[in-house]
Image (cartoon, grey):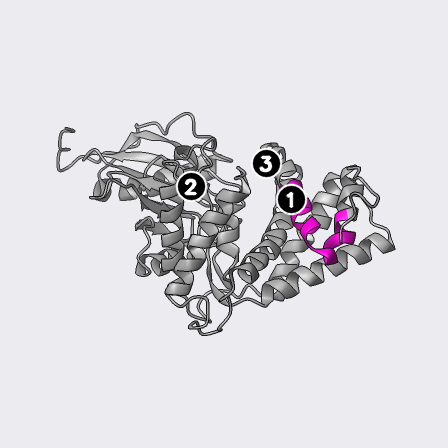
Amino acid sequence: MNPSPQPEASPLHTHSPINAAIVWPDAQREQAFQTWLQGIALQHQLAAETLRPASADASFRRYFRIDALNGSSLIIMDAPPAQENCKPFVDIARLMAQAGLKVPDILAWDEAQGFMLLTDLGAKTMMEVINPQLNDELAEPNFNLYIQAVDALIDWQLASKPDVLPSYDEALLRRELALFPDWYLAKHKGVTLDKTQQATLDNAFTLIVQRNLAVPSVYVHRDYMPRNLMVIEPKTADGKCSLGVLDFQDAVYGPITYDIASLMRDAFLTWEEPFVLDITIRYWQKAVKVGLLGENSPSGWGADFGEFYRAIEWQAMQRHLKILGIFARLTLRDGKPKYLADTPRFINYVRKTADRYRELGPFLKLIDQIEGIETAMGFAYGRM
């Protein structure tokens, strides 16, 4: 048990060095951080010498972990205001908490400088706990964790109201799709499309946007996957760990298919189709039961699982193309090359989905041309 500090002493003082593993872009921001941390240290009983990196993401945000004198730990977000706006994080955290989801509590926030103190949901993501080798529906811990993720998603969607979050409209869908030709094709692959190829791409994008706008709208996390779900200890009375939700600051109001598509067609791991179907069916059944989908829903859409699953595939196609562009941009603009290692997964997603739909046949041929993939031709391999 940590001893209590003397009343006149602060756990953080000017002689306590910030952890050397933390590198600052400039001395001015480091000094601003130390001044801010010093200002909140006494109130929250923080021990400066315990500050260490926690994680970073694909944006300019990064996170530190720091211990309190009561033995708990807290998280500090460093979000440079020139690149990151923290207000959506604050607003959406409140929405999610009201919906019953477990999200970090905001204990302190310097909006002008982009520093925030948060409660700590733990150090284990769902990605670190699941076993990618276990693909059977009864395999532990995969199945129960995915069902918990589905339940949290249902709660989030049930809280949905229009005109609260930005709309995931045609303009935004198209801006995201444009990342694929702008960054993946032109800058990463060095490809310049001719008129025929451009027409093929434009037609595919129009189809994708039309399909995705045809489904009901709900709150969309926009990156709902195991890397952004935290396994919280201790376990509940039934022996299960609860899940916390992170990285929700880009949430919008849009297609109900989006988050279940990102959960089951993950950016960093791939499940076999039976497992994807099993979890997706269970999500659909729950969504129908609570009136998000089906005949008793406001839209009346989604009563047929086949129709719903096809809509998920069209939504996943949009997401996969967007991510290919984002991963190329992270490498070429932001100096984060590790993300490109996962591009073959997304090319495979895109090709498999395009191969299921006749209207995407020309787009599949274009992808194969760009990727240098030879496909078998002839009557034996032709699609009907």
On whether residue 353 falls in the magenta region, the answer is yes
Would you name the residue on which mark 2 appears? 137
Q: Is residue 300 above or below residue 363?
A: below
**Residue for point 43% across, 32% down:** 131
- The answer to whether residue 75 is above or below residue 149 is above
Which mark identifies residue 375?
Answer: none
If you read the primary sequence from the N terminus, does the residue marked by circle 1 or circle 3 appear first? Answer: 1
Quarter placement of the C terminus:
bottom right
Report which residue position mark 3 lands on.
339
Where is mark 1, residue-wise? 324
- List x then y, in percent, for residue 36: 34, 43
The spot of residue 262 in percent (x, y) is 52, 49
Q: Nearer the viewer, residue 95 or 277?
A: 277
Classed neighbour count for the residue bearing mark 1: other residues with Cα under 10 Å, few (<14), some (14–19), many (≥20): many
Q: Answer with left or right where residue 118 lies relative to residue 224.
A: left
Q: CA distance from mark 1 to mark 3?
A: 9 Å
- In space, the residues marked 2 and 1 are separated at their CA atoms by 29 Å
Asked if the residues shown at circle 2 and circle 1 are in contact, with their CB atoms under 8 angstroms apart, the answer is: no
Determine whether 341 is above or below 181 in the image: above
Q: Nearer the viewer, mark 2 or mark 3?
A: 2
Circles 1 and 3 in contact, beta carbons < 8 Å = no
